Amino acid sequence: MEKKKILFIDDDNALTSLVKLNLEATGRYQVRTEAHGSDGLSAVLVFKPDLIILDVVIGDKDGSEVAAEIKQNAGSKDIPIIYLTGIVKEHEEQSLRDFLGGYPFLAKPVSTEKLIACIEKNLKK
């Protein structure tokens, strides 16, 4: 089985390391992390991920700006994006479904199981 490639763009290095470790431990994913939103599009074009996990608040660039750049590029416009954010609480996920441009999102912290379920659901679209 070929591993799905996940790009995780977030400036929280401890979180990205933990998510990378947990996702790769399943044997189903290859994960690349980026700490700077400004490197997002170039990382997408080089790594060619199957799915992108994106923080909303990244130190150098807003996550919505990164998502817009990705979606405006012909080589990356069809890659699914999931927001993983601390600005929304878990109990708000359902009521704020369209809050982030219609992209699915999860509140931090998130369990590995819930993250994988969301990844799998969006990979199938």
Image (cartoon, grey):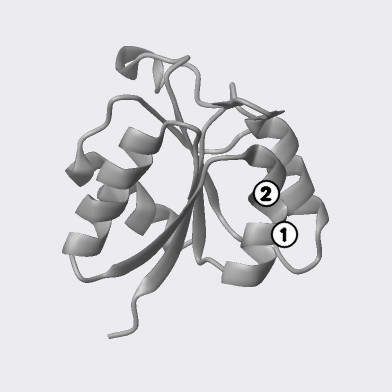
Residue 66 point in image, percent of width and height? 70, 40
93 sits to left or right of 78: left
Q: Amino acid at mark 2?
A: Asp
In front: 55, or 121? Answer: 55
Q: Vertical placement of 116 versus 75: above or below?
A: above
Residue 92 point in image, percent of width and height? 39, 14
Residue picked out by circle 2: 39
Residue 24 point in image, percent of width and height? 25, 62
What's the residue at 61%, 40% (across, down)?
36
Q: Vertical placement of 83 versus 70: above or below?
A: above
* Residue 91 figure quarter: top left
Residue picked out by circle 1: 77
Q: Amino acid at mark 1?
A: Lys
Answer whether residue 49 is visible to the viewer in this image.
yes
Q: Vertical placement of 49 versus 63: above or below?
A: below
Residue 112 point in image, percent of width and height? 21, 43
Q: Which mark is residue 48?
A: none
In front: 28, or 18? Answer: 18
* Residue 124 figure quarter: bottom left
Cα gap from disc 2 to disc 1, whole angstroms: 16 Å
Answer whether residue 78 is visible to the viewer in this image.
no
Q: Earlier in the sequence, mark 2 or mark 1?
A: 2
59 sits to left or right of 65: left
* Residue 76 figure quarter: bottom right
Marks 2 and 1 close (CB-CB < 8 Å): no
